Image (tube, rainbow, N blue to C red):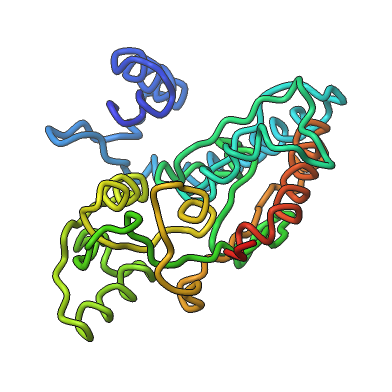
């Protein structure tokens, strides 16, 4: 019930009262077993799950279509994205663009680790490394982020800044590990976010992988090699088709397409 309360924004006593009232409409048949570790569905409760999910799907569809019906170019567009893509979008808000984001629209960038769900309208659009395999989504490839190795300009930074052992499956982490094995250079720091990497590299702690749009534009950093092709990161924009009809979401899609086209050389790490 605590988990349900967090998801619904309700207190645990309120959840308990509503469950009890709902069960009472079935003639008192218990739908949940009350156990010390929490609630568990009874057989009667499990039989209701498909119908409850069907009702939920219908209500969510109604909510998405209601949101999409407004012609106003105002409101908040919630974008679920990782640190790299979200940072790029944030910096482009003030950049000159042939397609401007209307002044009445506010972007809300959400860390993708929160796993915001497009079907449940917890986010309006998402930027992901791969397109979805199924679902009623409008999808387009936004662009590719080149990455390279950077260090503080002029610093003797031979050690590596890399991700934590829990993140060893990340493509940049695997590539750095191969460099460590080939060169015998030590690990100077393990850190879980790109911002931590950037600050460590900027301070001269070690060398590490950064998106070119971050490293090339930083006055204290120098690039040590051309972009590493095998760790370039593709991004796809995903929007539920119902929400694509909303005027403010369409405007955000158009703006995002424009900035990815206009910033293509920056993303690719093409130095002038």
Q: Residue at horizontal 80%, vertical 39%? A: 250
Name the residue at the right extreme. 71
Of the pair 170 and 220, the residue shown nearer to us = 220
Q: Residue at horizontal 25%, vertical 75%? A: 177
Q: Residue at horizontal 64%, vertical 36%? A: 60
Quarter of image, res 141: bottom right
Q: Position of residue 262 (x, y in %)?
A: 75, 52
Q: Position of residue 47 (x, y in %)?
A: 45, 46
Q: Position of residue 100 (x, y in %)?
A: 80, 34
Q: How many marks?
A: 0
Q: Can I make out residue 47 in this image?
A: no
Q: In this picture, is 230 found above or below 73?
A: below
Q: Position of residue 104 (x, y in %)?
A: 76, 20
| On-image quarter of the C terminus | bottom right
Q: Residue at horizontal 35%, vertical 67%? A: 170
Q: Can I make out residue 94 in this image?
A: yes
Of the pair 240 and 270, the residue shown nearer to us = 270
Of the pair 180 and 74, the residue shown nearer to us = 180
Name the residue at the front extreme. 154
| On-image quarter of the N terminus | top left
Q: In this picture, is 80 found above or below 148?
A: above
Q: In this picture, is 119 found above or below 233?
A: above
Quarter of image, res 17: top left
Answer left or right for 21 relative to 128: left
């Amino acid at each position: 019930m605590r988990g349900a309360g967090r998801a619904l924004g309700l207190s645990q006593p309120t959840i308990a009262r509503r469950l009890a009232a709902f069960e009472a409409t079935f003639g008192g048949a218990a739908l949940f077993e009350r156990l010390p570790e929490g609630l568990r569905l009874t057989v009667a409760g499990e039989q209701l799950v498909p119908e409850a999910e069907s009702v939920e799907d219908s209500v969510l569809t109604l909510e998405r279509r209601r949101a999409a019906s407004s012609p106003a170019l105002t409101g908040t567009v919630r974008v679920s994205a990782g640190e790299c893509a979200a940072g790029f979008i944030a910096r482009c808000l003030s950049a000159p663009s042939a397609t401007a984001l209307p002044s009445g629209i506010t972007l809300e960038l959400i860390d993708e680790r929160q796993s915001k769900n497009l079907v449940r309208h917890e986010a309006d659009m998402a930027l992901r490394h791969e397109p979805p395999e199924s679902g009623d989504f409008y999808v387009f490839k936004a662009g590719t982020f080149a990455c390279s190795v950077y260090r503080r300009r002029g610093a003797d930074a031979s050690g590596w800044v890399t991700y934590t052992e829990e993140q060893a499956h990340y493509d940049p982490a695997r590539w750095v590990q191969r460099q460590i094995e080939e060169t015998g250079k030590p690990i100077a720091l393990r850190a879980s976010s790109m911002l931590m990497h950037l600050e460590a590299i900027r301070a001269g702690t070690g060398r590490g992988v950064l998106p070119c749009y971050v490293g090339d534009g930083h006055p204290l950093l120098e690039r040590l090699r051309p972009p590493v092709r095998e760790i370039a990161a593709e991004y796809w924009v995903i929007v539920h088709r119902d929400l694509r009809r909303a005027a403010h979401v369409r405007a955000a899609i158009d703006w995002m397409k424009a900035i990815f086209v206009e910033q293509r050389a920056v993303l690719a790490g093409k130095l002038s």
